[in-house]
Amino acid sequence: MAKAGVCMISDFYDQSFTVTTPSTNVSAMGSPEPTWSDTGTFKGWIDKVTGQEQKVAAQYLGVVTHVIGCSSTNTWILKKHRIVDADSLIFRVVDTDNPVKRNHHLEILLVFNGIDQLST
């Protein structure tokens, strides 16, 4: 628990996110159809990555458009996942980072991937 007057990063974990995993359904015609299945949910904050931060990330990871900060217990989130926010915006996970290896919080680096038309 934070001391009075001290602001903790976890105080800002006020947005809900859904993690989705790739899977395959078989169509009525018998052909495989790629789809996404809900895997779990978590709370965090999201921010756009702009300017110098984006240039630095591009040197190591390619394009990064957003970052989510969340609890360090969310290590189950992997590059194969997509994340959908409360506004049905879809993000592809580029990488997860444990800043300065302190297990204080995770930063999930993302690329905006579109809008979930089925949920809007």
Image (tube, helix red, strand yellow):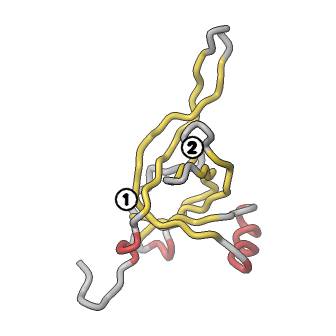
Q: Which numbered tag is attached to residue 73?
A: 1
Q: Position of residue 61 (x, y in %)?
A: 71, 62
Amino acid at circle 2: Thr
Seen as rendered, the residue at the extreme top is 29
The residue that disc 2 covers is 120
Q: Position of residue 35 (x, y in %)?
A: 60, 30
Of helix, strand and loop, which one carries label 2?
Answer: loop
Amino acid at circle 1: Thr
Seen at 63% across and 51% down, the residue is 92
**Marks 2/1: CA–CA distance:** 30 Å
Q: Is residue 22 left or right of residue 10?
A: right
How many residues crowd around disc 2 within 10 Å: few (fewer than 14), some, or many (20 or more)? few
Q: Quadrant of residue 105?
A: bottom left
Seen at 69% across and 63% down, the residue is 64
Q: Nearer the viewer, residue 17 or 81?
A: 17
Which of label 2 and label 1 is nearer to you?
2
Q: Position of residue 107 (x, y in %)?
A: 52, 66
Q: Quadrant of residue 94?
A: bottom right
Of helix, strand and loop, which one carries label 1?
Answer: loop
Q: Quadrant of residue 57?
A: bottom right
